[in-house]
Image (cartoon, rainbow, N blue to C red):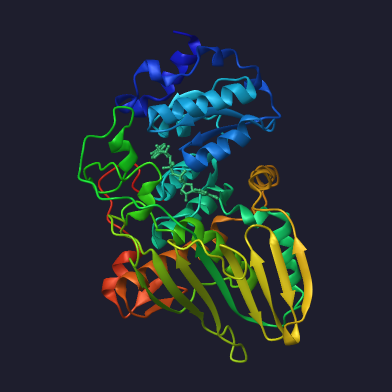
């Protein structure tokens, strides 16, 4: 056993009991001689959850000379191996492979982590990482429930770490240009913003509990979620349609569009009233979240002289037909005009009498720019473009919209206390029950 490996195992005594077999612990012993390890210009980082989106991050990080990916961490052995291969090919350096994220957090060399696990792991992992002093890039929606988002903000601030959320449109040059245009007052005062998500998803079928695959540590995949037996239509990726693990498509693609709606509307608080209709109109399967959803969020006027504002969200995940030219997009309604903004990289501004004022085409959501912004903020200590506090507001809209959809009645919300008022049943959905587990989120 090399010194490096022995030292590493020594450091990780807190998790020795759950450590994977030694053979699986390392992609390569060659890592001990890793030249990049001593390169002070490279930030030592880790990727946690290199699945669908996590591989998007892995592909970029593998060839980013600003970082050295020291670990890939996945509870699925096959996915971890695939990611390690990508890093090795791209950077010439083999990362360590682990399945328990505490091994990453225990390593003082690691300065930042990318977290692309399913939603139920976002807050637990991000809080543990922040408490270990790591800067955090965590995928959207930032949390699985509203309370977790608040805990994430507290963890980031208490530990003075950067916490960037994966809404990469916030770092996309063309979107920034469009939002700057709105700020000039080109369409007057914006009273209503709309976001929509229309596309054709696949059915998740109907399944019964079965044995998890051998390459998967299912108990670690569940984490602090109350135990329930494995079903093949939980993963990969399909977990997002289940209440226990995901937030539905509003928290998946919808949160990108909601975030851009909120950005243009310029709201820095939560809504006070939420009304929603929706449910399962199309799919006849195990999917629990709505496939069809219409939500109106109302923001109380900020001052006596101010006006209330509304954000509208519309979703059909069985219909790929475009609205205003886009599957995913936004409309901003101002007192003197309107703007249509397509996620794919186009916007159009209309003035009085629907006169076209400006049309612009630019780049689609720019993941590399979002990575660069995160790394820059680690260097400068500035708040990132999709800081946890910004995304908490957008992700909270997903949670409140889902709560109103499930309750089937208007929800009243106290933005300062982050509490639902007058509806104790709906209020229970602002958090969740966790099992007794080391990753149970606490700050
Ligand atoms: N920013 C974007 O544009 C974008 C796009 C797609 C997905 N996402 C987000 O990325 C996240 C992942 O989505 P996905 O579709 O890639 O899901 P996925 O199921 O394909 O990938 C999740 C990965 O995390 C692993 N994992 C689960 N628990 C883990 C744990 N405790 N430790 C380490 N690894 C663990 C799984 O084995 C899997 O490989 C979601 O939050 C999703 O919303 C973001």
Judge whether 415 appears above or below 191 on screen. Answer: above
Residue 338 in sight in this render: yes
Q: Residue at horizontal 58%, vertical 50%? A: 164
In the image, taking residue 120 as reference, residue 367 lies left or right, namely right
Give residue 397's position: percent from left, percent from top: 47, 67
Name which quarter of the figure residue 372 lies in: top right
User: Looking at this rendering, what residue extends furthest in the bottom direction?
Assistant: 305
| Residue 295 x/y as whole percent | 44, 74
Residue 26 falls in image quadrant: top left
Q: Is residue 265 above or below residue 199?
A: below
Q: In the image shown, does 437 or 47 lie closer to the viewer? A: 47
Residue 287 vs 304, above or below: the answer is above
Q: Nearer the viewer, residue 51 or 200?
A: 200
> If the picture is divided into quarters, which one holds ligand 1?
top left
Q: Is residue 133 at all visible to an observer of this figure?
A: no
- Tell me the residue at 59%/48% (across/down): 162
At a point 26% along the width and 72% down the height, the residue shown is 425
Is 57 placed above or below 392 here? above
- The quarter of the picture where the N terminus appears is top left
Total marks in image: 0
Residue 260 image offset from top left, x and y in percent: 60, 64
Residue drawn at x 29%, y 43% as measured from the top left:
437
Q: Is residue 186 left or right of residue 272?
A: right
Residue at the limit of the structure toward the right, as seen here: 357
């Amino acid at each position: 056993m090399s010194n490096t490996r022995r030292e590493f195992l020594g450091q990780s005594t807190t998790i020795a009991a759950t450590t994977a077999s030694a053979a699986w612990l390392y992609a390569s012993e060659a890592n001990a001689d890793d030249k990049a390890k001593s390169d002070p210009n490279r930030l030592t980082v880790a990727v946690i959850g290199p699945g669908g989106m996590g591989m998007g991050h892995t592909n970029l990080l593998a060839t980013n000379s600003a970082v050295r990916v020291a670990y890939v961490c996945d509870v699925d052995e096959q996915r971890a191996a695939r990611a390690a291969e990508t890093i090795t090919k791209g950077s010439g350096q083999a990362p360590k492979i682990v399945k328990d994220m505490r091994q990453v957090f225990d390593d003082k060399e690691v300065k930042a982590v990318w977290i692309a696990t399913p939603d139920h792991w976002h807050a637990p992992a991000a809080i543990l990482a922040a408490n270990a002093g790591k800067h955090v890039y965590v995928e959207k929606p930032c949390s699985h429930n509203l309370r977790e988002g608040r805990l994430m903000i507290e963890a980031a601030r208490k530990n003075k770490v950067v916490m960037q959320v994966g809404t990469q449109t916030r770092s996309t040059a063309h979107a920034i240009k469009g939002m700057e245009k709105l700020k000039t007052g080109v369409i007057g005062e914006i009273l209503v913003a709309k976001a929509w998500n229309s596309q054709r998803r696949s059915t998740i079928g109907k399944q019964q509990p079965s044995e998890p695959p051998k390459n998967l540590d299912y108990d670690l995949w569940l984490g602090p979620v109350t135990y329930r037996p494995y079903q093949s239509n939980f993963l990969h990726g399909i977990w997002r349609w289940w209440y226990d693990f995901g937030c539905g498509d509003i928290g998946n693609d919808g949160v990108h569009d909601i975030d851009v709606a909120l950005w243009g509307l310029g709201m820095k608080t939560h809504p006070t009233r939420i009304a929603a209709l929706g449910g399962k109109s199309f799919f006849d399967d195990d999917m629990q979240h709505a496939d069809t959803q219409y939500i109106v969020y109302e923001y109380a006027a900020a001052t006596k002289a101010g006006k209330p504002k509304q954000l509208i969200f519309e979703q059909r995940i069985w219909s790929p037909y475009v609205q205003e030219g886009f599957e995913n997009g936004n409309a901003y309604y101002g007192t003197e005009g309107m703007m249509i903004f397509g996620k794919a990289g186009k916007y159009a501004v209309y003035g009085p009498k629907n006169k076209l004022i400006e049309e612009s085409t630019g780049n689609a959501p720019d993941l590399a720019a979002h990575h660069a912004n995160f790394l820059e903020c680690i260097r400068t200590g500035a708040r990132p473009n999709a800081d946890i506090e910004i995304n908490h507001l957008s992700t909270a809209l997903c949670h409140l919209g889902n709560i109103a959809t499930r309750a089937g009645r208007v929800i009243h919300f106290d933005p300062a206390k982050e509490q639902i008022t007058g509806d104790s049943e709906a209020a229970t959905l602002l958090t969740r029950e966790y099992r007794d587990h080391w990753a149970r989120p606490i700050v």
